[in-house]
Image: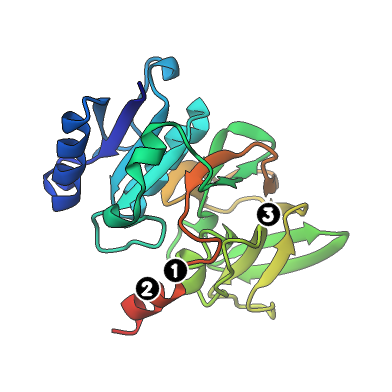
Amino acid sequence: MINLAIVSSKKYLKSKQAVELIAYLEDQKIQFEKLLADSGIPHIENEIMYDLIISVGGDGTALKAMSLGWKHSLPVLNLGSGRVGYLVNALEDIDFESIMNRNFKSFKNRSPIIQNNDESMAAFNEIVLIKNAPTRMLDMQIETYDQIVKLRADGLIISTSLGSTAYNYSAGGPIVQTSINSLIITPISPFTKFPRSIVLDNKSEIKITIFKKQDFSVQFDGTEVMEGNELKDVVFDYKLSTNEIMVLEQSDNPKLDHFLNQILR
């Protein structure tokens, strides 16, 4: 028998999708536990207790579930019940009978971005380096494939293809198919001359140097993980992890029709 962890919020647990999912699980006598994500990524005491994580909510809830799955090496199924639904699936599209029998053939492997080879933190959408002082810009240096570029901007986004429709898109970056495993560098309000975005392959490594005496923060998928204001230059190395998690996706292509319908309303 499969054991599930349902990641959601108090609000989304009252949604039609959550009510229908829980009713199905109870009818099939499938064991599950609710993990609330209202205050961040939930905590799991023992990953051996679960075979699959199911999130119910929007893209924010999905990212928390994926971070939890990454930490505990568990597959993730994201169900939509929020306003923004690029990372989630419709309840009626899921073959639950197959999945409850541990058939994960429709799941895709996803690699997050890691910082300084630290696998304890990972970003599935993007990592953002951004200024904290509203009247100052951030002076930095970008190095990849032996090319060095200096940049003065409000900040910098390093995105996955999965996250290309999030902050990257809002900052003018390209939409990249999720089947293309890539890294995207997009500046935020650049002052110096810089390409609108740079798309790199999945083997790329990016070195970012933040020059000394600047007030900045680093965010992983919208969550601040550190602040800096050092007396010396700060260097960060970014790349896609070679470790992966399994995430249910109904198609190899991003749901562009759904996404464009949302933003063009």
Left or right of 70 on screen, residue 16: left
Left or right of 158 on screen, residue 61: left
Residue depicted at 59% across the width and 69% down the height: 176
Q: Earlier in the sequence, mark 2 or mark 3?
A: 3
**Do labels 1 and 2 touch, CB within 8 Å?**
yes
Left or right of 102 on screen, residue 230: right
Q: Image quarter for residue 23?
A: top left
Residue 258: numbered disc: 2
Q: Secondary structure at mark 2?
A: helix
Which residue, given by chain and number where applicable, does mark 1 sit on? 255
Q: Toward the viewer: 42 or 249? A: 249
Image quadrant where one finds the N terminus: top left
**Vertical side of 140 occupied by 110: above or below:** above
User: How far is the residue under mark 2 from the one under mark 3?
Assistant: 41 Å
* Image coordinates for residue 190, horizontal then vertical, percent: 59, 75
Evaluate whether residue 92 shows in this view: yes
* Image coordinates for residue 71, horizontal then vertical, percent: 50, 29
User: How far is the residue under mark 1 from the one under mark 3?
Assistant: 39 Å
Which residue, given by chain and number where applicable, does mark 3 sit on? 211
**Do labels 1 and 3 touch, CB within 8 Å?**
no
Q: Earlier in the sequence, mark 1 or mark 3?
A: 3
Amino acid type, residue under disc 2 in the picture? His
Left or right of 61 on screen, residue 75: right
For mark 3, does the 10 Å Cα neighbourhood hold few (<14), some (14 to 19), or many (20 or more) residues?
A: some
Q: Image quarter for residue 85?
A: bottom left
Residue depicted at 48% across the width and 49% down the height: 219
For mark 2, does the 10 Å Cα neighbourhood hold few (<14), some (14 to 19), or many (20 or more) residues?
A: few
* Image coordinates for residue 80, horizontal then vertical, percent: 29, 55
